[in-house]
Amino acid sequence: MNPISHLLPKLARYVLAAAIALALAPASLGQAEQPDSGPSTDFFVMLGSDFIRPGLATKANYNIGIGHTFGLLKKDPFGDEVTFGYTYENGGPGFWHSSFGSHTESFGVMKNFGLPATKRITGYTWVQLGITSMTGNAVVQNEFYDGESLGAIVHFNPRNSIWIQETFNKVITVPWYTTTSIGYTWSW
């Protein structure tokens, strides 16, 4: 076996730990300084389809997670919301489900921003890092995951919204692929 393949999971863990530390440190410090900055928590459920490259094969993609927005970080260029999510993606024949799949746990940083001339629709960018476990083979393979999203949120009221997003996904041992998703979010 290639000696580099043993280093990749360790490297992925260190990168993930560093990203989490960098994302959480400014948020926790800022929250202590200004407790009345208007934080909110979002619970999201997204359904979508992967478009695997090459060939644009479609596969089911289900995502559930939670995020916390820190109002005092609205001007932070990297993000104002820290997220944790779980994603299941079908990796085998068919669309909905097969014994081959990937299960991803990821931490992310989301940047919400307003769009000109509307308060009903806002935009966001979302960077996620995590570990993907690929199942269905004799051995479960754990690999580093990176996801980069661009999306829009349609706000029905302060508690309910719909998210629409496009995500560029990369797992070290898999060709890149995109995911188009739509989801419901409940905020409190």
Image (cartoon, rainbow, N blue to C red):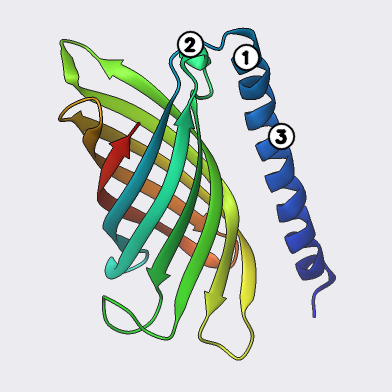
Q: Separation of disc 3 and disc 1 at Cα?
A: 14 Å
Q: Is residue 86 left or right of residue 58?
A: right
Q: Earlier in the sequence, mark 2 or mark 1?
A: 1
Q: Amino acid at mark 1?
A: Gly
The disc label shown at residue 30, or none: 1
Q: Is residue 65 left or right of residue 164?
A: right
Dot 2 lies on which element? loop
Label 2, residues with CA under 10 Å away: few <14, some 14-19, many ≥20 = some
What residue do we see at 27% from left, 68% from top? 58
Q: Which residue is mark 3?
A: 21
Along the line of sight, the residue nearer the viewer: 78 or 58: 78
Residues at circles 3 and 2 in contact by the CB criterion of under 8 Å: no
Q: Amino acid at mark 2?
A: Ser
What residue do we see at 28% from left, 65% from top? 56
Q: Is residue 5 left or right of residue 53?
A: right
The image position of residue 88, as x and y in percent, is 42, 66
The image position of residue 140, as x and y in percent, is 62, 80
What residue do we see at 73% from left, 39% from top? 18
The disc label shown at residue 37, or none: 2
The disc label shown at residue 100, or none: none
